[in-house]
Amino acid sequence: MSSRRVITAFASVMIVLTAVYYAFPGWHMAIWTAIGTASALAVAVGVARNRPRQRLPWLLLSVGIFAFAMGDTTYLFLTEVLGHPQPFPSLADLIYLGFFFPLAAAGMIGLARTRASRDRASLLDALALTVGLGLLSWLFLIDPYVRADDLTWVQKAISIAYPLFDVLVLAILARLVISMRLTPSVLLMAIGGVGLLVADVLYGLSRLGFGASWLMGGPIDLGWIVFYAAWGGAALHPSMVALTDPRVPGRASLTVRRVVLLALSTLIAPTVLIVQAIRGHDRYVGVSALVAALMFLLVLARLYGAVSGYRGVVARERALREAGAALVSASDVGEVTDAVQAAVSRLLPAGFAHRVVLAVGEPGPDRAATPAGIRFVYTASLGPDLARRLGHIEVAARCPLVVTHRTAGNPYLGTLLVAADETTLASLREAIEVLASQAALALDRIGLAWEITQRRSQEYFRTLVQNNSDVILILDGGDLIRYASPSAGAMFGADPLPGTPVLDLLDPSSRRVARRMLNLLRTGERGTTQDDWVAIGVDGARVQVEASCRDLRADPTVGGLVLTLRDVTERRRLEQELTHRAFHDSLTGLANRVLFHDRVEQALGRAARNGTMVGVLFIDLDDFKVINDTMGHACGDELLVAASQRLTAELAAGATAARLGGDEFAALVEDARDPEEVELVAQRVVAAFGKPYLIGDSVLNGPASIGIATTAEAIDGDDLLRQADLALYVAKGAGKGQWRRYQAALHNQVLDRLELRAELDQAIADRSFVLQYQPIVDLRTGAGIGLESLVRWQHPTRGLLAPGRFIDVAEESGLIVPIGDWVIEQALTDAAAWCGTVAPGDSPYVSINVSARQFRDPGFVDRVLERLSTAGLPADRLVLEITETLLLGDDERVRHDLVRLRQAGIRVAIDDFGTGYSSLSYLRKVPADVLKIEKSFIDAVASHPQQRALVEGILRLAHTLGLTVVAEGIEEEADRDALVAAGCRYGQGYLYYRPMNHPDVLRWLADAQVAA
């Protein structure tokens, strides 16, 4: 149903209800309730139909009107049904004052603030009118109630509240009418407010004894009926959305009507004073003087607002002048946009949220339909792209970029959009319009300059063609050359003569492709073609050319095919080289990660078609970082090249080897029948990498760990690579030179290892480690001479963990350094304690393991010496055990630190001798005191002659070099006897003692003293 029909129906209902109300006095209560309820429903229906921007003020008015109707119904019920003669105060007064007044006031204030929250001039004018009329209300309504002796203070307060509310309604309505265009909704709101005001005043005067007494169904009720009908109609009319919708306000001006109204308002107080003086009364002199003073202050505020407005105008003019200067110097659209944005930032208060978009070149109307002036719009209505660029601020000012008096073309160049607070945009309306006109002129100037540049460039075209290095040929219908640019001589050695077939200039391998390309142009299947050909250049050299051909037979100035040939020989060579580098490792020449991933995807496709299996090997060189750091990057690069050659040699034809980065390699195995075939490849690669490398003059070991994954477990390429990576992680955790194939259980192992890594951080902070000590004894007598410190982790849930469970994780993460520092500090403290329990010279030494990473940590030697001094332990009672990995390469800093330790009296032991990288020659060069033979050499030394001969050789060499030898891991008496027979004096192992805690060490030392 249209709005007109709805309003007509509502008006008809209100007229019928009014007629029935006056025609049937017995139905007064029911009809009056129906009139008020109809008005409240009309407001609610208007909100639902018209969907204003702010619904809350209208909904408050709807509920307030309904409360007003309920107050009237309550009053009628008390008087006509219960028979109370004019009850005052009553429940109806509570409804009026407690519900209707607050709700109606809140709704009207909400409408007023939505439309003109910063229009101070309108606010001051409305206050002036309100103060003037408020004085009259005081004289004729409020003051009589105050002076009434027959009323209690409660009755006086309630009686005064009614005219005060009327004054508030008058103030709000005055502000709405003054600050807004008189739309039907505004006019109806004003009529309804006047009706309410007139009815309340007449009712109040009747209560005071002025005029006829109020009777139900009398003429005073018409004022309230007008209030109900007008406010309901205002909400139903579509113009009600204008009260809250964004709209460019009209230019503030003092019309004659407004000046007369303000003059009359300001004259009310002086008139009252004059009348009082004539009558000789001074009752209202004080109130009138106060109102006059308020009027004076309002006038001053109005003048101050005018001065502030003038200052704002001056500031805006300054900002616009600066923007004009910036726009004059702008040379492109980007600079114009920057200048406009800077100008808007200067026009707005500092830090004020806003967005500026200069939409240039958007489809616009023709000249006759060019929009004029600025409009306020919702940003959501501008489309998602513009709304996003405007920061989704609700309201934006939209001003067209129009060049007036343009002689040619569409004067509409685009749109300037400024999103900000609506009231702020309203104050900058004229400035935005001026800025838009300046931006339009700047854009028009830039466009004209571009056109001039284009015309000048055309004048240079012929010169450019004549001096262009590209060869330009014009061909006739038989592919004969009709024109050749001068650059053809440089490419072909001589200028092609007119009439020469163009195919004669090409290599035979390109003639068929060229003929097909030219035929496609002539048949119209293509308008432009481009391809690479091979031409015959100077002295018969092959020249790669990029051929571009365009059909310009319809152009009367050309009348043929235009063929452009560009020499791209060098560029194609560089492209091929770059392509090879993009997909191959520059050091080893193997495929890189990108090419390997592509090969994997291709292999998976082939395997899916022929039913075979694909396997991936991830290969990582163990301890490559140590070799690279100690022997130099050049040596490391040679090792990588040698490893890549071994990897390629072990793979079958068709397999792909790749270097993924650093010391990581990969291999792709195709056409495998089962996982065992892939495992055999991994075994061969592990064996090949396990052989020593001859790098320069050095022999290096470069074992590798391998992770295997096959399509038996993986579902796609990414899954296959991820599984291989997990398997490699597990293989490295199992030790050096190992391979592991991915299985579902491996995933849990990796997660467990990662969890252990996270818990290790907390363990260091909580100092959750303990030390145990294993005695080192004289193999002949069994007497203890020292103790080796062994770290254990007291895990909160896993119990006591041996080093094998967490040391590898600590090495990988670098946490071995803080753990090792704690071990040294605690071991020195314990050793100092047990030294105090035995006779001087009889205390056993303490032997502490130091990792290569910990030893290389800056300041390691200084920390050891400092903690040794703090503990008070003699230096000769400390032995530091290092691994052969630390001795790899000629690292002078390592040698210098070892010498410092030995000069301080600390002994150095080489732990796990024979399992690392060092050769026997290191024993002569490295400053060491003790040689510890690893357990694998000790096991079965009594039963295997070769093992025994090897141990005897190590012992003889060590004795020759003056090194003390300690055998590790002695568990059998036969092995001990064989070691004693071979000349080994010291050892340790479970045959003698298991690791013990510090208290057990003290008891062991005490027992040893008693036994002695």
Image: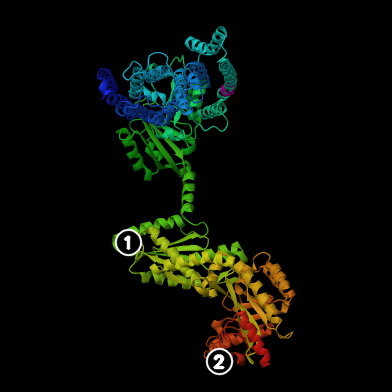
Residue 187: % across, % down: 39, 17
- Front position in the image: 398 or 37: 37
Please indicate whether residue 878 sits to the left or right of residue 142 in the image. right
Q: Is residue 639 visible?
A: yes
Q: Secondary structure at mark 1?
A: helix
Amino acid type, callout 2:
Glu
Neighbours of disc 1 within 10 Å: few (<14), some (14-19), many (20+):
some
Q: Is residue 645 visible?
A: no
Q: Is residue 651 above or below residue 99?
A: below
In this view, the mark in front (1 or 2): 2
Numbered-mark total: 2
Q: Is residue 169 above or below residue 663?
A: above
Residue 836: % across, % down: 71, 81
For the point 51% across and 56% down, the residue is: 586
Residue 534: % across, % down: 41, 43
- Front position in the image: 343 or 770: 770
Q: Considering only order in the chain, which callout, 2 or 1, is on the residue closer to the N terminus?
A: 1
Q: In this figure, which residue is indicated by the disc labeled 1? A: 607
Q: Which residues are magenta?
A: 318-324
- Residue 973 got which mark? 2
Q: Secondary structure at mark 2?
A: helix
Q: Is residue 673 above or below residue 589?
A: below
Please indicate whether residue 183 sits to the left or right of residue 525 in the image. right
Q: Is residue 732 magenta?
A: no
Residue 399: % across, % down: 46, 23
Amino acid type, callout 1:
Ala
